[in-house]
Amino acid sequence: MNRRRFIKSVAATGGATSIAASAPSALAQDAKRETLVVANEFGPNSLDIHGVGANRPAYGVAVNAYDRLMTFGRKKLPDGTMSYDYNKLEPELAESWQVAKDGQSVTFRLRRNATFHDGTKVTAKDVKWSYDRALGMGGFPQFQMRAGSLNDAKQFIVVDDQTFRVELDRRDKMAMPNMAVPVPSIYNSALAQKNATDKDPWAATWLRNNTAGGGAFRVEAWRPGQELIYTRFDNWKSGPLPRLRRIVQREIPSAGNRRALLSRGDIDMTYELPPKDFLEMAKEAGPVRVVSTPIENALFYIGMNTTRPPFNNSLVRQAIAFALPYDRMNDIGFWGRGNKMWGAKSNTPAKAEWPVPHGYNTNVPRALELMKQAGMADGFETTLSFDLGGATVGEPISILVQEALARINIKVGINKVPGANWRAALLKKDMPLIFNRFGGWLNFPEYFFYWCYHGQNAVFNTMSYQNPNMDKLIEAARFETDPKRYDAQVKGFIEIAFNEVPRIPVIQPAFDVAMQKNVQGYMYWFHVQPDYRTLFKA
Amino acid sequence: MLRLIGRRLLAAIPNVIGIVVVTFILTRALPGDPAAFYAGPAATQEAVEQVRAKLGLDQPLWKQFVDYVGDLARGDLGLSISTGQQVLDEILRRLPASLELTLLGLVVACAIALPLGILASTRPGSWIDHACRLVTTLGVSLPIFFTGLLLAYVFYYLLGIAPPPVGRLDSMYSPPPHFTGFYLVDSLVAGDVGLFLAAGKQMILPVLTLAIFVLAPIARMTRAAMLGVLSSDFVRTARASGLSSSTVLYRYAFRNAMLPVVTTMGMVFSFMLGSNVVIEKVFAWPGIGSFAVDALVQSDYAPVQGFVLVMAMLFVAINLMIDILYTAIDPRVSIDD
């Protein structure tokens, strides 16, 4: 019964009903090979990445059901894993583009034969409407667009049906890659506008539950809280046709059950498990393969509030950096799954890269000495806060920090903040000591530093760190065109960040995915959502 | 009877009004800032304020309340930001899932607990009494997530006889056309026996887990009530009159012992509905409990308010039903005065 029903559904989508009746078993096997079953802790809360509160899995919908003008190329990492390539932009909906000599505008030629899922031709009008929408919806999509100097709808110009031009106020190296992230997805403007109202000109309500895209997969069914089912869009022209025909993405909250489902072969892939499970599965000889990739531009760190004593004193901050039990934090908190961010030869980075290890390591005598210099030999009392939403890591780390700081006479209380309150607590900027994580989409050091160290004091400058010299270097690097000077600027602000150490980087986390061994074509993306377009089953 | 129902429903109105006010104030009093939460990963203060305005949370509290009551009057429970759906749709979809599980769990629990309790009470101190004690102690003391995970581990992972714990249906099936929202009923209405079996199979482990957990209070209550009744005068009289022991036991003793048992069942049922969260999480069941808890964790006000309101109405309905059952069980009981 299972098999027959299954064939029926696949045959209906493939339009091969008559064959299904004659050769059921061969077809069933094909169907199984062309269907991917994925289970994660939770699914999208919206099909529209521009919507208020769209969660991470909603970014995945944008990736698979919508196209962008451009996408990133791919490269092989040293360990053999495939990853998107930050330095290579490739055509998606746009078949070619031309950047003006002064770098202040770029003209895209759209594919002639590209259509949306409903068969409507994709035109420059749709592109403009979508870009306007990303700005007009406000909140997250607007801020992401602005990160690449896309500030105003006037910058988006429809030249003709096939030609779209973006004008920039200044040369900005983030502008182009920022048009390949999931936010500037291209929407079917005619379909969306049909479902817009006077109060809702961007059709936000309708697009939350429906897609109007032209991506490689269409959403066949979405049952919030249960599952999302994709079927392949056979007329997809923006890349090689995916080999998977159908993807079932289910929500299975219990991590233990996801692991059991994977071990028994009932699901093909899962993204979110505690690090311990990934470690064990990676060691097991079973049918499961674990792929682990360091998350670019992401760090777990200990942050200190620099606006008030005792952490306004850089000697105290350095003392803490020498007191942290890095190895134990890595082993116990992260199960060794991540890149170490400590113990470099010095605080001066060799290359203009980020993240790189800092020069501190566990050295208690040195920490005691620094405390003495700071006039704090008797220590003080403080509170370490962490997000309960990430308690699997936060809890053991906090206890290790508490133990370690006791050795330099600092008495640490632990404050567990519920997930819902964490962002609000960060915004208030009054926690003295925190354990937190930040990751930036765009893989530029100055992008990370702009959010985390710049005097504009964004939410993620959780230390409220202010240093005009650093601001100057960050701003200069952002628009620097000379590679040598750029290198010096990046090394400069990294060195300040390490010497002054308002935050102590601990671990660059790894992104783990567990899948059946026959699942091939996995590729790491900065948005850490599955890209089903490249996946297939051997 | 109709007058009774009407009067009880009228009496429930002030309760419901009170609940509306209290949940509104409570959700607002919770720490946490939904605007900050939903502003997304790269939010600035400005972005947070934009989101706040969009959610209507920049309005004064009284204005928010007036808007909320106005929406309620139109049957609009608001929008859940965490799932992106209308709260009413979400509840209508999830409540049957929870109800189906809970009802079945209760039926299974009663099927085990009632005979067990009766047998234990007729033979106090015997092996069956000890067995009853053991089962109930185990049922209460095993945490529900533990039982659930254990059952899934043994019957699915090790033995492979139970279906995968993936929710109401395996991914090969699509749900039956919506009629009652109970998959077991809807699949039969649609005449699809295969689907009925598939949905039934998915229910076995979660229903067992639930039953193990709730059979304890029912069995204990049955035993205690039966012991009390069996030692009472009218039972002695019945025995002395030479009535067969089964007549004494079932027609006289059990019927009289039912009152406290039914009360317990009512309490257990409403308790189960709300506290199914753990089971729902373990078995990926798209129920109403996990919906409310997820919303709470994410400062999503509308679902929490909607959940409490719906639960309150359910409580009113269940209490009413139990009262009606009372009068059916014991005609001397009168609540219509």
Image (cartoon, coloured by chain):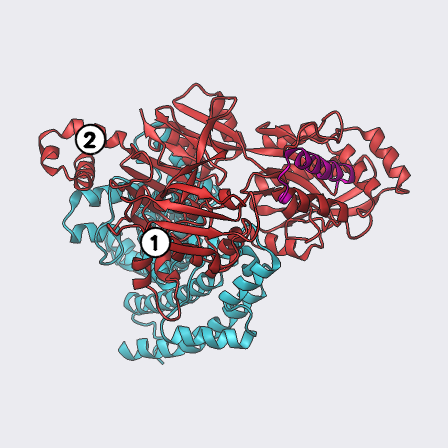
Label 2 sits on residue = A28
Magenta stretch holds residue A169: no
Task: Name the secondary structure under disc 2.
Answer: helix
Q: Which residue is mark 1?
A: A160
The residue closer to the viewer here, A39 or B193, is A39
Q: Is residue A85 above or below residue A174?
A: above
Is A370 placed above or below B213 here? above
Q: Residue B50: which disc?
A: none
Mark pair 1, 2: CA separation: 47 Å
Q: Position of residue A325 (x, y in %)?
A: 72, 31
Q: Where does the image place residue B314, in percent across and percent down from the top left? A: 37, 65
Q: Is residue A498 magenta?
A: yes
Asked whether residue B230 appears in the rendered view, the answer is no
Highlighted magenta segment, given as a residue range: A478-501
Whichever of labels 1 and 2 marks the residue nearer the N terminus, that label is 2
Say which element carries label 1: strand
The kind of residue on which mark 1 rests is Asp
Count residues near mark 1 (Cα–Cα under 10 Å), then give few for <14, some for 14-19, many for 20+.
Answer: few
- Which of the chains is cyan? B
Tell me the quarter of the image containing the N terminus of chain B: bottom left
Within 10 Å of disc 2 (Cα), the crowding (few <14, some 14-19, many 20+) is some
Chain of the residue displaying label 1: A
Percent of width and height locating residue B292? 45, 57
Q: Colour of chain A?
A: red
Quadrant in the picture for residue A436: top right
The type of residue carrying mark 2 is Ala
| Image spot of residue A98 (x, y percent) | 44, 42
Q: Is residue B4 left or right of residue A483?
A: left
